[in-house]
Amino acid sequence: MPSFTREAARNPFILKISLLAALGGLLFGYDTGVISGALLYIKKDLHAGDLSQSWIVAGLLVGAVFGALAGGRLADLISRRWTLLVSGLVYVVAALAAAFSQSSGQLVAARMVLGLAVGAASAVVPLYIAEHTPPKIRGGTVSYNQLMVTVGILVAYLVDFALRGIGSNWRWMLGLGALPGVFLVLGMLFVPYSPRWLMQRDRRDEAREVLRRTRGGEDYEEEITEIESVLSEERRAGLGALLRPSLRPMMVVGIGLAVIQQVVGVNTVVYFSPTILTYTGLHANDAIAQALSVGITNVIFTVIAVLLLDRVGRRVLLIVGTVGLTIALLTLAAFFAFHWQHSAPWVALVALVVFMASFAVGLGPGFWLMISEIFPLGVRGTAMAVCSVFNWAANFVVSYYFLQLVDAIGKAWTFSLYAVMGLIGIAFFVTKVPETKNRTLEQIERDLGAPSSPARTSTRHRTA
């Protein structure tokens, strides 16, 4: 039995907290997946051209940039738990508003509000889970968030497939998105506050009780002392603290991971996989059916990543996964360059499946996990929020310009461009990204070439 599975089974309380918090990933996953199929019908019903379609997809991403910025601050003000609960409520209202939209403009506005909820949840869920989880199983539990994203995408693809033949189907597709928000709200009623947030509020006894339950009988007093020792540093830390020389190497890694995760084109595949498959000659209903294989692959290989991250390590999976998705992108470029649509139409679907499998074991969970590990506790919330903003901003640029890029330079050159980004990513991971599995903050800092402060060299800080 993998060590992660064995250790997690010893503490069902941690599993409960992690899975319920990771319901926040369903918000992004469902909405990401459902718009890919719904868009094929929205463009006919609302007479949406390429520009309107781009904004319908990217409206959520604009909102997510601001939601991610606000999420870190709200997590400190009202707690991680209540931030996620409020995100769920906002998502429910916005999903229903999207379903009842009467124009492209109304739909874009509703999706921007959806983005606020999705962005806030994306910044807070990994932070919340990491603060509850012991280091030896942190890789797997934090990656539950990415697993829930993939489950949400698959569920959305299934909904798109089931509703593809009924009238006003896209309204039902979008309206059912309210359910993940309801699940998140209910889930947050049954989880505790983060021990770190409780310590910020001088609720030491409550923090000790939460750690007692999450540490499964292990000594946690040193962890209480550690949290207490860095809180004063955090109170003085703002965005300016991220520019300190000791943190710059970590910010380079975090922002680099954030941008590379998007510029390889993953969300063009997720948002537009049915559209891409229509380029091969398939009709809309058949394209939605084939896109199911992409969603299933995403879930299966994310589960594999959850089981491997604490055994193989983060860096190895990042490199191997990015090599795989780059090969898949080059295959897609060749498919369109040599017009294999008629002689070998199956190649496009195989390439999309390989791309998604490779992303799911590497960049998918790797980015969100590593930004919850590489930053010192005193600035972790702020640093993760900044990395999330860069991630959502890159997501917006890539997704918004996909259809326009295809029109301007063609499908083959578009996927070739994403492949070049994959090659840059591989070089970045090999030269800049350290392994964080079972490593202390001091070791990570040394790998990144950052000078250690006297305070940190005197205290052995953990990364969770």
Image: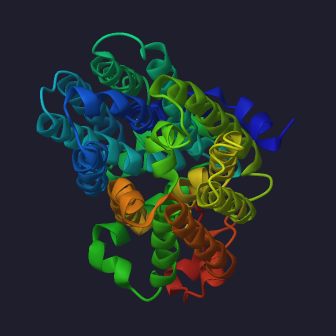
In the picture as drawn, the residue positioned furthest to the front comes out as 342
Left or right of 304 on screen, residue 139 = left
How far from the left and from the top, in percent, is residue 182?
33, 20
User: For the point 23% across and 23% down, which residue is it?
Assistant: 99
Q: Nearer the viewer, residue 22 or 233?
A: 22
Asked if one can make out residue 222 in the rendered structure from this viewpoint, the answer is no
Point out the image quarter for the N terminus.
top right
Point out the image quarter for the C terminus.
bottom right
Q: Vertical placement of 36 versus 366: above or below?
A: above
Q: Nearer the viewer, residue 346 or 262?
A: 346
Q: Nearer the viewer, residue 368 or 323?
A: 323
Left or right of 40 on screen, residue 339 = right
How far from the left and from the top, in percent, is residue 293?
64, 31
Q: How is the image coloured?
A: rainbow
User: What is the count of numbered marks?
Assistant: 0
Displayed quadrant of residue 211 = top right
Left or right of 440 on screen, residue 204 = left
How far from the left and from the top, in percent, is residue 251?
45, 76
In the picture as drawn, the residue positioned furthest to the top comes out as 166
User: For the point 71% across and 35% down, which residue is it?
Assistant: 8
Asked if one can make out residue 427 in the rendered structure from this viewpoint, the answer is yes
User: For the point 54% across and 78% down, which residue is it?
Assistant: 456
How far from the left and from the top, in percent, is residue 309?
72, 51
Q: Vertical placement of 175 versus 396: above or below?
A: above
